[in-house]
Amino acid sequence: MLYIHQTSCISPQGTYPSPGAGVATAGITAPRRPVDNLLRAIEPSYEGIPGSILRRMSKSVKMGVGAALSLPGSAAPSRVLSPQGILIGTGNGGTEDSVKFLKQIIDYNEGLLTPGTFVQSTANAIASQIGLLQHNNGYNVTYVHRGLAFESALIDAAMLVNEHPGHSYLAGGVDEISDHHYRFEYSEGWYKKEDLSGKDLYTTDSPGSIAGEGAAMFILSGTPANAVAEVKGVLTLRSEDHPTIKAAIQLFLERHLPAGTLPDLLLSGENGDNRGLEGYELCEAMMAPDTTIARFKHLCGEYPTASAYALWLACNLPAVLPGHLVKWLPSKEKVYQTILIYNQYEFSQHSLILLERSL
Amino acid sequence: MTNIMETAQLKQQLKQQIIQFLNLTDITADDIQDDKPLFGEGLGLDSIDSLELIVLLNRGYGIVIKDLKDGRKVLVDVNSMVDYIEKNRTK
């Protein structure tokens, strides 16, 4: 039993809450489109982070810390909320600063190097900075399992909550677009070659996706009172064999849903890459005819921890889905209580998150 | 007169380098007074910044500070840094 109590998100859409305005949903109803096939996050002014610390932070650290500190009551020293642990998933960490640091080593012939970019570029800089700023010296772990990094953090949180149901934990997923990393992945064919201006990501019928970035944070505990949703199950799988993937999805659904039932909504990580479409359609085919199918990558882009954005979206979905999200809408109106998030990263890393929203 | 002008130019250059190296995006060179302490109540720099400044002196002026005691005397304010640069620079 893993319950989500609070959520926050910095993304390419208007998902960051204004002070006192509660959860922002503007990005869901009026989405921003990619520029040069990139969906860069809309960063807030990070008012909760001291300027002397902020100036050293890489973008991923800023987004992660900014999203964490925007959770109600989480800003030290007046924080009300005091999670017993911080668990962050990041596929790439602060790649941009890592490259800067490596470049310094070459440019200055392995001589005297500035420490800032090194300190900020390590993947665990996000969780450790949140810990420092929240004066939280509890469990502090970072998962770097590429496309399964966020799910690994969630699984760890679920195990911790199983041991300590009364404790709360901060878990999140963070990744940034690094220009260097984008060029590497572009040359490997993971991003689209054609300009997507004015086109629908999902009907391009070509290889590659659009790059994205963001940070989504969640306060989790084993207590159902006042929870936004319950995470019923999380599964990670590494495989490119479709029968294996299908069997894993089937077993996951049987294990976590009442017999004979299927999710009200499938939130699919389909990303416009025609090479991966078959995998997503495999999961879609396993849903009931009255399961609504929605997609989210046109909102956040593709990045290793995009599933964290999907979880935020699932927790904050409006009652009526905007048309741009919908792939399949059954004729009968539905209340979206059970939501299955299926995501794959670079075809081989698959994850399932099953959510039951509190309505 | 030339020396005074050169020193003034060096101070201006150093202030801009400090801003760039330490990513002090919210201030300009004019905001850094020559005798304003770099650490504590002045610019509010900290120990990580002192390492960045030592690297700046090395890369920009070919100065190697090996003794921490020297560093404490040099990294007081812009005046002390410029004075040390003028006496010890190799480039």
Image (cartoon, grey):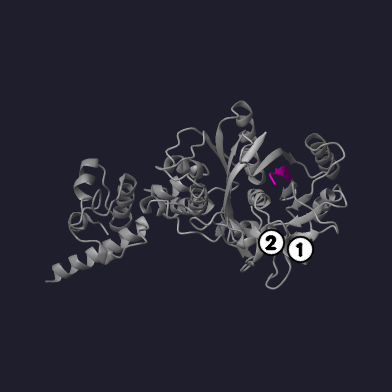
Residue farthest to the left, as pictured = B1
Chain letter, disc 1 residue: A
Q: Residue at x 21, y 53 (%)?
A: B37
The numbered mark, 2 or 1, whose residue comes first in the sequence reads 1
Q: Main secondary structure of the magenta part?
A: strand
- Chain ID, mark 2: A
Q: Is residue A62 left or right of residue A30?
A: left
Q: Position of residue B51 (x, y in %)?
A: 32, 47
Q: Is residue B89 left or right of residue A325?
A: left
In which quadrant of the rendered view does residue A25 lie? bottom right
Give x and y (percent) for residue A88. Answer: 56, 42
Asked if labels 1 and 2 touch by Cβ distance under 8 angstroms, the answer is yes
Q: Secondary structure at mark 1?
A: helix
Image position, residue B11 (x, y; %): 22, 63
Residue reaching furthest to the top: A163
Residue A100 as seen in the image, left or right of residue B73: right
Secondary element at image label 2: helix
Residue visible at 72% across and 71% down in the picture: A199
Q: Residues within 10 Å of mark 1 (few under 14, many from 20)?
A: some
Picture layout, residue A314 above or below residue A222: below
Tell me which amino acid carries mark 1: Tyr
Say which mark, if any, is on residue A298.
2
In the picture, residue A277 is in which quadrant?
bottom right
Residue type marked 2: His
Bounds of the magenta segment: A349-359
Question: Within the magenta stretch, is there residue A49?
Answer: no
